[in-house]
Amino acid sequence: MLFAGTPFELNRVLLIRLLAVAVLLVVLWLGTRNWRVVPTRGQVAMEFAINFVRQGIVIDTLGEKAGKRFMPLIMTIFFLTLALNLTGTIPGLQIASTGLIGQAIIMAVISYVTFIYAGVREHKLRFFRNALWIPGVPIAIKPVIALLELLSTFIIRPITLTLRLTMNMVAGHMLLTLCFLATNFFFFTVLAGGNALGLLGVGSLLFGVVFTVLEMFIAGLQAYVFAILTAIYVQMALSDEH
């Protein structure tokens, strides 16, 4: 759509991503620049959103000390995922960037690198040994357990993070597309042709509205899941058992 044929070309999805980031930055800046002792309604809403991530995800999972270190990253993951998810429910945009697997892969890689960094910084290279060679396991099955831990911790974990987010957004997008395409068909093809069956478009429109509300809930839920799983992985990497 812009700068075609150059290294800076932008398609519709990239423009939506840039718009979502710009709106997110403006909302967070306006919502936090003039906090008062007696809060306004907007300040109350912003405090609730920030404290939800700060206390409900970061502090409750990592504690105060580790939470302060990783709070900026986990905050960013939550609000960015939420913003990119919600674009799928906004008329005129109607595509969640996280429904394209490339975006989800980038975010999963960031989460993956973060928990490995946390474990190596806390335990040095013992992190990998303790994660794979679990103490207390009978020596005969230790190699099998080590292989399973390698798969689950270092290979499957980023894959599940990616697919969970992408598939939920794709499924929601498909539901909304089917409902509103059906509405368009019934109203502007069937009903416009004089067939009373076109009134079925009222039902598909209502389903579309209901699924839009559901998709907004799922957008928030998936942002929460991605952020809290990142916090849990970091906490597991920092724990003494590893």
Image: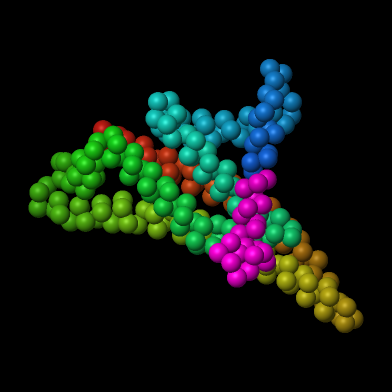
Query: 62 left or right of 54?
Result: left
In this rendered view, identify the residue nearer to me: 151 or 213.
151
- Can residue 13 be found in the magenta stretch? yes
- Residue 134 picture location, percent across and down: 19, 44
Using residue 65 as the reference point, say whether residue 28 is left or right of it.
Answer: right
Residue 53 in picture, x, y percent from top left: 54, 35
Which residue is painted at 15% across and 41% down in the image? 136
Q: Residue at x 68, y 40 (%)?
A: 26
Give percent across and percent down for residue 72. Answer: 49, 35
Magenta includes 154? no
Q: Which residues are magenta?
A: 1-23
> Of 32 and 45, which appears nearest the observer?
32
**Is residue 129 at least partly visible in the picture?**
yes
Residue nearest the observer in this picture, 20 or 79:
20
Can I make out residue 224 in this image?
no
142 vs 202: above or below: above
In the image, taking residue 54 as reference, residue 198 lies left or right, namely right
